[in-house]
Amino acid sequence: MRRDPPSPSPDGDGTPNVPPAPLAPLIHGRARLLVMSHLTRCGATAFTELRSRLGLTDGTLSVHLATLEQGGAVEIVKEFVGKKPRTVVRVTPRGRELFAGYVEDLKRIVPGLSPGDV
């Protein structure tokens, strides 16, 4: 199959107008995006609070947290408060980088997300 070369950029600077890369699949799902947004904004959060704030079921949240943990975006710590178990989720430095990159990708794709866009 023949592919045409990328067209010149609209501003005429000679650099190719290459379509943006797809959004990071690790974060792009609705539940994972909600989790990453919450943790980035609010910091470490107990599983039960995260579940309530995001309106997810235990099973749904568990599956998406496991995916984020495998991707290195979050850390899950199980601890005891007195005799009660508590699971706390926090975003990792890699997770912050991934989320920042995701937001930058969105700004390139969606007009109006960056300051100064029309």
Image (cartoon, helix red, strand yellow):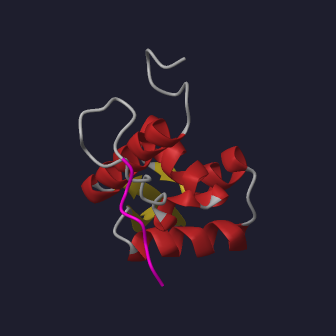
Splitting the image into 4 quarters, where does residue 30 fall?
Answer: bottom right
> Above or below — where is 71 with respect to 23?
below
From the top left corner, tell me how far across and down residue 39 is, in percent: 47, 46
From the top left corner, tell me how far across and down residue 58 is, in percent: 70, 68
From the top left corner, tell me how far across and down residue 105 is, in percent: 43, 46
Q: Nearer the viewer, residue 117 or 77?
A: 117
Q: Residue at x 46, y 36 (%)?
A: 107
Q: Residue at x 37, y 56 (%)?
A: 6
> Above or below — where is 73 with respect to 1?
above
Residue stretch rendered in magenta on the structure: 1-7
Q: Nearer the viewer, residue 6 or 66?
A: 6
Splitting the image into 4 quarters, where does residue 32 fall?
Answer: bottom right
Splitting the image into 4 quarters, where does residue 103 fall?
Answer: top left
Q: Left or right: where does residue 101 sit relative to residue 62? A: left
Asked if residue 52 lies in the magenta stretch, the reply is no
Placement of the C terminus among the 4 image quadrants = top right
Examine the rendering and report whether any part of residue 82 can be seen.
Answer: no
Please identify the dominant SS of the magenta region: loop
